[in-house]
Image: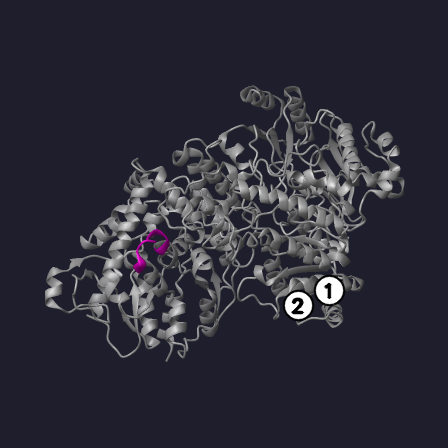
Amino acid sequence: MTDQRELAAALRAAVRGEVDFGVTARALTTMDASNYRRVPLGVCAPRDADDVAAALAVCREHGVPVVPRGGGTSIAGQATGTGVVLDFTRHMNRLLSLDPEAGTAVVQPGLVLDRLQEAAAPHGLRFGPDPSTHSRCTLGGMIGNNSCGSHSVAWGTTADNVRTLSVITARGERLRPGPGWAGAPEGLRPLVDGELARLRTGFPDLPRRISGYAVDALLPEHRADVARSLCGSEGTLAVLTEAELTLVRAPRARALAVLAYADESGAAQAAAGLLPYRPLTVEGMAADLVPSGADLPRGGAWLFVEAGGDTDAEARAAAETIVRAADVVDALVVTDPARQRALWRIREDASGAATRMPGGTSRTKSVGGSEAWPGWEDCAVPPARLGAYLRDFRALLAEHGLRGTPYGHFGDGCIHVRIDFDLLTGPGVARFRRFSEELADVVVAHGGSLSGEHGDGQARAELLPRMYGAETVALFERVKGVWDPDGLLNPGMLVRPAPLDADLRFSALPREPVDVAFGYPADAGDFSAAVRRCVGVAKCRTTSVSGSAVMCPSYRATGEEEHSTRGRARLLHEMLAGEVVTDGWRSTEVRDALDLCLSCKGCRSDCPVGVDMATYKAEFLHHHYAGRRRPAAHYAMGWLPVWLRWAARTRTAGAANALASVRPLAGLAKRLGGIAAEREIPRLAGEPFSRWWRRRRPSATGEGRLVVLWPDTFTEHLSPSVGRAAVRVLEAAGLRVALPPTLRLPSGGRRMGDARSRSPLSLLTARRGRVCCGLTYLSTGQLDRARTVLGRTLDLLEPVLATDAPLVVLEPSCAAALRTDAPELLHDDPRAARLASRVLTFAETLETYAPDWTPPAVNRPVTGQTHCHQHAVLGDAPDRRLREAAGLTGELTGGCCGLAGDFGFERGHYDVSRACAEERLLPAVREAPQDAVVQADGFSCRTQLEQLGGVRGRHLAEILAEALDRRP
């Protein structure tokens, strides 16, 4: 039995990089993107090759296995292990050199592929292979798995693009493998010389043969390339410390032909026939994986065929030639780069979207559809056999009562598919095994490879004898013995493998539903199922985003796995499992990881499987602080509506502002309230919005359509100018504006369509109150209080809900809370769903209820940021159309402002808050034209702009109201 403390101390003494045997580090590395879970002893982040050698020496001395790990996106289990994990992403992540003349680059194993592509692009170069995880997968992981990607029909696999490697064996020998037996360990050449006949006849000849060891690369006719033979060895032979790669010349222009077919079988049969036209990609996917409203030609399945050229015209001509040669239902040729990126995102998100299929009958079915899993993610057959293979594959699925939607690299005969295995019950796991064994036979019958991209790992290695035969698999074991005679490197993977149905990550989760506050309607009320949504594809670990994307701002600010959506989901998974995180809802490790979650909800829309970490955070905080004292900020800012309401009732806003302007008093208030010292306390409005409303007019008048304007806390007490502007614009558009009731009517009281009651009797017996979305209580996890507040709000709104009047909500975060959080928290109150269905944004209201109204012409450029909740929950298409109609040119940036309600005000969050703002929002405003209008619909966004950028942002309603005032 290994003494963890002794091992950790020895590693700390030997290496200069970080050594972490704590709960969080171990919990974050129990899983990759596969079905498997194995708990490591600890994690070591080496700084250089010397650290790697030192760590290997310590582990060898203690008899502890070593698992090299990059981005952790492997889907066969090979990035998990029970020993010491070597994390190369923290330090060994640099591009060491790039030679444009030679077309080569030297990289460390932890370098993310996109960083290499960015460095090579100015020279017209790129690395050929590009998996869909290119924004977070590492070059070391790609070499370990021999990854491929969508451009493999043109540029091959990773092995085809590797020149030399620098590796360290488990016994500490430093080698530099390359062609001509360079860097071969002692004993490897004699072994190969004795097996030449087997190596020449026992390996299938197909472009995507990734399974097993590439021992045939050591044949003389293949230049005895030791580096190539190591590609795809999954960290089981040696530890990579450096790689020299070949770069390819990227075409100056590209055109994307999207070819539509009736079904995926038709698309698969057509793919091989397009290869003579030398396309850059031939990717396929079916309708089940395509979001509704996607901009694709009509059909049931599509091939994404990319063509290149020196000019746009040349690339388009090549794509159109492919279209003419293809027998298609419909087709589309796209040359605009932005539109091409949007189409490619549909394909790249398929790996996550495939984990939730509509309907189904599996044990793991939820309201949102059945859960589907990897395991048979990437087997490959000769491209000409793909159509026939798919028919047999479909038949086997039907025979076992399973479902899966194929997609992937049709031009290479490589199919990705996630299948709705029941991996939670004994019979389901037994069926998983039977299906795997039978499908392996089908793949082999078609001359295929069990793995066509992602390696064998634990998922398929047990089945390699069916593909290669026992004697060739025994040869693999002898190769392993030459490189790693002590069996320390990634044991249980590829050779002498663990059973494919062992170590399943679901087996550790509780079998009974966890008692929770939210309803989790997309997961049948099961919090475990909600946490299971994270399959580890790690889109949240992307270090830069473009367009309107948001996820995951805290990870981009810190670079720490625990502050990514995946990292937090992993900690919640381990919290439920109870083996590594042992104190359940009281866990300080989970609390600390969630502490820097901005609750931006970006993951709700940007995560391919719809993980909603903001909701999970609120749930956790609710349980974590149950019956306990909370942080001061939860009382100061969580109860903000109460404090602001009292200030309004007592008319002490002016006094509060005066006191806040006195630095010592403001400092004391911030310390007591848990507010960051760097922050300024926002000024309260002298006249709340509703008081202005009452002074202006007693009730809604006019003949237009009635709309009810929601007086959220921020508009009411901090930015009443937004409310006044909205009234001005809505009325100019011909709408009749009312505010929600402030009296709760007794049963049977008379209800008016303008949301007011004029019955004297009912006024005498009514209870006074204010509507509130409960946002501040939700974000701080005070869910009992949020339920109470929302329940009172529903009581007040019953007169409104009895009509068909919409609720216009100006603050995006409040609109998002009402539209999604309220019905999910009050899942037992049907009024919450009715309320959610009435919620409209300002732009949605004008588009729906004043479609013929022409907004005033602003005719200026616009800058700013789409509110993260608007992006994630509400959508901004109506806002874009309204801006366009008003002559506001340009696009708002994505990301998150970093203030995010109470987050940026809370003590300890200031640096991350500022880093989030500096990522996209502040640079966009600084770089905007001088006459640009700065739009920021959220109070947090406007506050962040003012406090960090010295810029006044305005709500779209304010921009339009100001233009109305200027209009003759």
Kind of element beneath mark 1: helix
| Residue carrying label 2 | 261
Q: Position of residue 627 (x, y in %)?
A: 29, 36
Residue drawn at x 57%, y 53% is: 401
Relative to the observer, which residue lies in front, 482 or 709?
Answer: 482
Q: Report which quarter residue 811 is drawn in.
A: bottom left
Q: Position of residue 928 (x, y in %)?
A: 51, 61
Query: How far separated are the C-alphas under marks 2 and 1?
Result: 9 Å
Q: Which residues are magenta?
A: 823-831
Residue 270 circle label:
1
- Image quarter (top left, top right, bottom left or bottom right) of the C terminus: bottom left
Q: Are the residues tagged 2 and 1 within 8 Å (C-beta)? A: yes
Relative to the observer, which residue lies in front, 144 or 645?
Answer: 144
Relative to the observer, which residue lies in front, 122 or 646?
Answer: 646
Residue 519 circle label:
none
Let me know if residue 591 is in the magenta part. Answer: no
Which tag, 2 or 1, sits closer to the chain's start? 2
Let me know if residue 824 is in the magenta part. Answer: yes
